[in-house]
Image (spheres, helix red, strand yellow):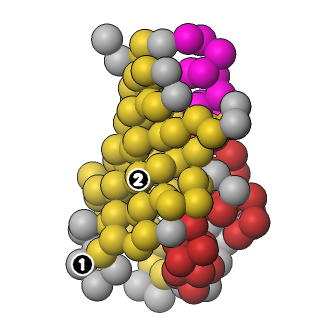
Amino acid sequence: MPFTGPAEDRLALRELLETYADAVTRCDAEAWGATWAEDGEWSLPDYPDIGTTRGRDAIVAMWVEAMKHYPGIMFEAWPGSIEVTGDTAVLRSYTAEVYDWPDGVHRDRGRYDDACVKIDGQWFFQRRTFRNIHRQIGEKGL
């Protein structure tokens, strides 16, 4: 079953994902960083030069530097599965992002596999692993 556990927790996890996406689009490091557990882990296996970053402060610092290369990004995310067990959850989500790059407009699709944790009543990303699904590059202005 792709959506299991209390509806209240599943809604809170959707809102965590939506907060993350909104913060990316607004390039808001504080709001984006607040979605991560203190000891979070972010893995980008399709980007071996980046690899895995551990700890919220290190994750946010890496993200702030990376976002300098994505002006005007539009980032969307939606859940494919949310499975809640007590104060932990497994979340699968899909992403669509559009941004300008020197070689044109990129339209990327991806998948996150997440482990989330509830701390003092609030959900956080404990571990996120991102994989590319599809990239389309088009002329600017289209």
Real-space Cα separation, disc 2 to disc 1, in angstroms = 15 Å
Determine the residue located farthest toward the front in the rendered image.
120
Q: Callout 2, which amino acid? A: Arg
State whether residue 92 is above or below residue 105: above
Helix, strand or loop under label 2: strand
Q: Position of residue 35 (x, y in %)?
A: 63, 52
* Residue occupied by mark 2: 128
Mark toward the start of the polypeptide (2 vs 1) = 1
Residue at left 47%, top 88%? Answer: 102
The structure residue drawn at horizontal position 34% and vertical position 64%, both measured from the top left corner, is 43
Query: Which quadrant of the figure has residue 90?
Result: top left
Q: Is residue 125 above or below residue 6?
A: below
Q: Which residues are magenta?
A: 6-15
Q: Residues within 10 Å of mark 1 (few under 14, many from 20)?
A: few
At 57% from the left and 67% from the top, the residue drawn is 56
Q: Place residue 13 in its image quadrant.
A: top right
Q: Position of residue 15 (x, y in %)?
A: 66, 34
Q: Is residue 44 visible?
A: yes
What kind of element bears circle 1?
loop
Q: Which residue is mark 1?
A: 48
Q: Does the segment drawn in magenta span residue 107?
A: no
Q: Tell me: residue 121, above or below residue 113.
A: above
Label 2–label 1 contact, CB within 8 A:
no
Q: Is residue 142 left or right of residue 81?
A: right
Q: Position of residue 129 (x, y in %)?
A: 34, 55
Q: Which quarter of the rendering shows the C terminus?
A: bottom right
Q: Is residue 136 above or below residue 105?
A: above
Point 52% across, 48% down: residue: 125
- Mark 2, Cα crowd under 10 Å, few <14 / some 14-19 / many 20+, is many
